[in-house]
Amino acid sequence: MTRKLPDIRVLKQHIDAGMGRIEIATMYGCHPDTLRYVMRKAGLFIAMRSTPEAGPRPAYRPPHLRRQVEVKPDRIIFTKEVAAGMHGGTMFQRISVPRITSHVAALQDAGRC
């Protein structure tokens, strides 16, 4: 059972105290989108936080920031953007290939070359 959202004045106090939409919605047991609808109707907005929160970063990076080839001492890793599923979307597939020099060194150590 959800509780009734408080008065707009109380919501404004929560926003001024630095609380986020998800925190306020959790406090009153409602969905964050419901709170956003009520706040938008009242003309209240929560500013975006300038510092990102700790945790995993999103997988998508713009193409100019993406490293498509990584050279490691023992392998080369290619990152390729591919279509994901039949409903669209994209995902990144990482392909790790051993360096040929590692194979040659292994063959030389084994006495085969």
Image: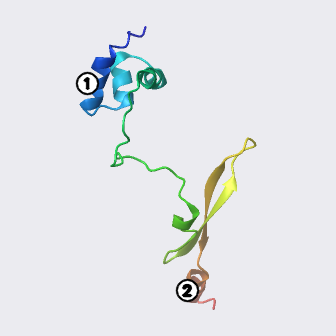
Residue 14 sits in which quadrant? top left
Q: Residue furthest right?
A: 86
Kind of residue at disc 2 = Ala
Residue linked to disc 1: 13
For this rendering, which residue is in front, 43 or 94?
43
Task: Give the residue displayed 38% in from the left and 46% down from the top.
Answer: 55
Residue linked to disc 2: 105
| Element assignment for label 1 | helix
| Element assignment for label 2 | helix
Q: Would residue 57 appear left or right of 108 to someone viewing this image?
A: left
Residue 18 vs 102, above or below: the answer is above
Task: Give the residue displayed 55% in from the left and 67% down from the top.
Answer: 64
Q: Residue furthest bottom?
A: 113
Instruction: Kindly indicate whether the residue at mark 1 contacts the one at mark 2 (C-beta within 8 angstroms).
Output: no
Q: Residue 9: where, in percent of width, then height?
A: 29, 18
Q: Residue 4: where, in percent of width, then height?
A: 38, 9
Residue 98 sits in which quadrant? bottom right
Task: Give the residue displayed 61% in from the left and 82% down from the top.
Answer: 100
Dot 2 crowding, Cα within 10 Å, few <14, some 14–19, many 20+: few
For this rendering, which residue is in front, 34 or 58?
34
Dot 1 crowding, Cα within 10 Å, few <14, some 14–19, many 20+: few
Q: Residue 94: where, in percent of width, then height?
A: 60, 61
Cα separation, mark 2 vs mark 1, equals 67 Å
First in sequence: mark 2 vs mark 1? 1
For this rendering, which residue is in front, 79 or 24?
24
Kind of residue at disc 1 = Gln
Q: Would residue 28 appear left or right of 107 to someone viewing this image?
A: left
